[in-house]
Image (cartoon, rainbow, N blue to C red):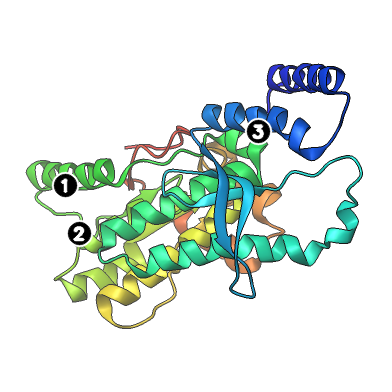
Amino acid sequence: MSQILINDYLKQLDIIKKVSGSQRETIVREAFKDLLKAWGKQQGLIFLAEYPLKTATKSNINVDGALLHELRMPIGYWEAKDADDDLAEDGHQEVQKGLEPYYAAIRATAAQISSHGEKQTFLKVIYENFYKVYNAKAADRLGVVYTPGEIVRFMIDGADWLCEKHFGKNLIDKDVDILDPATGTDTFICELLEHFRGQPKKLIHKYKHELHANEVAILPYYVANLNIESTFAAITGSYEEFPNLCFVDTLDNVGPHTAEKGVNADLCGSVSEENVARIKRQNTQRQHLAGHPGDSRGQGQL
């Protein structure tokens, strides 16, 4: 949160206390409400006062406010307290109960998804918003804003057409390796699998041997792994581990040091032997890997 907003809040709070001569919750909470609304607006969030929710015991209550993102799901609740309230007495378990409506809303929305495209959009929005709260500094540094599904599908269709025109092969054909160098939650690979639907034998070969993806942040790496494998299972009707997802910085995995060492051992050697083996296997592939322009981190290549 910006220092300007905080300073404005403190000034407003000080004025309210001086004029009213009180620090009661009903008086001072207006200043904090203004702070939440201003910060939420900067983040593309909507503040709703007197937000209704259902407790763990199924009773209906209204909290003082909630911040919601574009899926109309709250990312945080606000209940005002005054200086005499003992927050410790409220108990940490009550906080956990307060989060349950958020998770319930996610589950309910996910259950209504009927198409592959909607699933990828839902996953992208949930992940982007969660990561910005979970690790704001990393989100700012890495630029966690992923390519919209419509753009990904356009890129795949265009690359497929160009590959056939100039090389006489489609992306699904044997000996066409594809690398997603900054995979994020892996919408690109999942959209490729959907693009290959209807050609099961070629799809299975491509999945096992000629699709490659890299990710440098651990949280999206795990999300990507689940996303790819669940998409493959949904298309083929059977589960297969995806063997070509690497936890590695693609930009740091190219160049003379890679040719000399065969793997970026400093970054990934301590993760797992399986990950190192995957990176080595990727580095021994043919050098004409096709990649997509990636997300806003700019790690992509063609």
* Helix, strand or loop status at disc 1: helix
Name which of mark 2 and mark 3 comes first in the sequence: 3
Instruction: Answer whether labels 2 and 1 touch (C-beta < 8 Å).
Output: yes
Instruction: Answer whether labels 2 and 3 touch (C-beta < 8 Å).
Output: no
Question: Residue reaching furthest bottom?
Answer: 238
Residue 8: x %, y % from top left: 72, 17
Q: Residue at x 64, y 67 (%)?
A: 273
Name which of mark 2 and mark 1 comes first in the sequence: 1
Which residue was labeled with disc 1? 157
Q: Residue at x 89, y 40 (%)?
A: 83
Instruction: Answer whether labels 1 and 3 touch (C-beta < 8 Å).
Output: no
Q: Residue at x 71, y 27 (%)?
A: 31
Name which of mark 1 and mark 3 comes first in the sequence: 3
Q: Is residue 167 above or below residue 230?
A: above
Q: Quadrant of residue 62?
A: bottom right
Q: Please rate how many residues cluster around mark 1, counting C-alpha atoms within 10 Å: few if below 14, some from 14 to 19, many from 20.
A: some
Frontmost residue, 89 versus 232: 89
Frontmost residue, 87 versus 30: 30
- Tell me the amino acid under the disc marked 3: Lys
Work out how far the residue at label 2 is from the one at label 1, CA to CA, in angstroms.
8 Å
- Tell me the amino acid under the disc marked 1: Asp
Frontmost residue, 292 versus 121: 121
Which residue was labeled with disc 2? 195
- Tell me the amino acid under the disc marked 2: His
Q: Is residue 12 above or below residue 48?
A: above
Picture quarter with the C terminus = top left
Q: Is residue 129 above or below residue 293?
A: below
Q: Residue at x 64, y 72 (%)?
A: 56
* Helix, strand or loop status at disc 2: helix
Q: Is residue 188 above or below residue 43?
A: below
Residue 174: x %, y % from top left: 21, 63
Which residue was labeled with disc 3? 33
